[in-house]
Amino acid sequence: MSYLSVILALSFVLVAVVISVRENLELEKDLMIGTFRAFVQLIAIGFILKFIFEMEKWPYIVVMIGFMVLAAARNAEKRGQGVKNVFPMLLLAISMGEILTMGMMLGLKIIPFQAQYVIPISGMIIGNGMVASALTLNRVKAEIESRREEILVLLGLGATARQASSSTLQASLKSALIPTVDSLKTVGIVQLPGMMTGLIIGGVSPLVAVKYQLVVMLMITSTVSITAMIVAYFAYSKFFTERHQLI
Amino acid sequence: MWMQAKFLLEKVGYEVEASGTQGRQRILSDVGITIPAGQIFTITGPSGSGKSSLLYLLNLLRDPTTGVIFLDGQNMAEMNVLEVRRKVGIVFQKPFMFKGSVRENLLLGPKLKGSESRYSPEDLLEMMGLEREMARKEAILLSGGEQQRVSLARALANEPDVLLLDEVTSALDADSACSVEKLVKALCEEKGITVVWVTHDMEQLMRVGDNSLLLIDGRVAFTGTSDEFKHQYFPSKREMNTELFTDGRL
């Protein structure tokens, strides 16, 4: 693909801009900024990845992953406004998702410890962890708000904060896991996932691409479960005092 | 006659974070009262006077900002919260039923505690004047009056010493409200349970309350027997209703 093709692809954004103007959505500025940022960010990451792949030294890999985790936690933090100490909690949850899932993949020798494998796959783990933690956080807040009456009755009966939040935790974890479970059910029928599509376009045999995609999907399931569980368990406690009082 | 104090409140104040930029909002100020054991103590006052907040303090659903509350002579700030809540049951204005049978609802308190109640769900229903067979019914399908009585029974399953009632009859029809009043009076007389009852209804206050507290803007405006309350605020035997809070006498 030539650079000219990439530039010509900008016409796709123009379609969105035209729709925005026609329908009075006032999204033109955001679309322009978004497109500019996507260009700058992707070109920058292209150079950074090229540099790291060529150096092939573990400290660069760790720094890169650390940066990705920080950016993901910062982004998910927006969903947790009003929740105390939300950033360290998200940092911990997303890091744990990455450490445990990547640890399993390396430990079971599913992938080798090489930058070209570890960094893109970490990107997927961290990205999915970010979405799962934002979803969980949002849901915990909404559930606690909508179940105040139920929680007060339970606390009044002598329940601990954990017991009184049991339904909240269940609902929040379910809502974080449902998109992953749904995509497991429909993959290959409704959608061909990005990674597999990328490999096929890059000339890899579809059967090899499928093998990678399966590993990735199972890995995402693990990441989402770990991250959502950590966020849910930390987040609910922020809505109670140490004396089991609903804030 | 000297009565043993169940609760003793000394200079109790309670504040909350106000929404917006108003800083802190004072809900209760300098409340000093004694709630005698084994009696029905009613709390009344206009909306927003701090009645429900006071009830929450007695169950440790909230902690006072200033002052001390003693329960059976013990400082509540130093007591185990969960034990207090099992000893001091609370029933809210709107009955809340959990999904499942009436039986499951009635076993909830003991299940949370990890123990068994002295009363079976059927015994509790009978105590509330409901049929024993109701235990098998789906709780959310009961009428409002039945749900409120099941809520009372659910609080009693923990075998509390104190029952806190937050306008429990305000959403019920006159017959259901009357039967709840009779039940609570019987519980107080037969089992020696101390009842703290928040009500807006002046006639109810006179019917059920041994002692009463009137709160205005979070401060004690009156405390004494319900008869004294009547003589002070309704000397001409005029109709007792919530006019008291709106007709300029307070």
Image (cartoon, coloured by chain):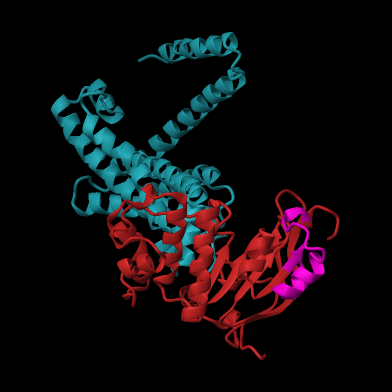
Chain colours: A cyan, B red
- Horizontal arrangement in the rendering, residue A117 relative to residue A131 (left or right): left
The furthest residue to the bottom: B2
Does B211 appear above or below A202?
below
Residue B126 found in image quarter: bottom left
Does B103 appear above or below A132?
below
Does A118 appear above or below A239?
above
Residue A125 found in image quarter: top left
Per the image, is A176 magenta? no
Q: Is residue A237 visible?
A: no
The residue that appears at 44% across and 60% down in the rendered structure is B149
The residue that appears at 35% across and 51% down in the rendered structure is B99
- Horizontal arrangement in the rendering, residue A226 relative to residue A141 (left or right): left
- Horizontal arrangement in the rendering, residue B19 relative to residue A46 (left or right): right
Which residue is more in the foreground, A119 or B89? B89
Which residue is more in the foreground, B151 or B180? B180
The residue that appears at 51% across and 67% down in the rendered structure is B182
Which residue is more in the foreground, B200 or A58? B200
Q: Which image quarter is the C terminus of chain A in?
A: bottom right
Per the image, is B242 magenta? yes
The residue that appears at 64% across and 76% down in the rendered structure is B210
Q: Which image quarter is the N terminus of chain A in?
A: top left
Name the spot of residue B192 as percent of width and height, x first. Answer: 50, 81
The furthest residue to the left: A207
**In the rendered structure, which segment of residues is drawn in magenta?**
B214-243
Name the spot of residue B95 as percent of width and height, x first. Answer: 48, 55
Q: Is residue A137 visible?
A: yes
User: Total of numbered circles in the picture?
Assistant: 0
The furthest residue to the front: B237
Name the spot of residue B132 as percent of width and height, x first. Answer: 30, 63
Name the spot of residue A131 as percent of width and height, x first. Answer: 42, 40
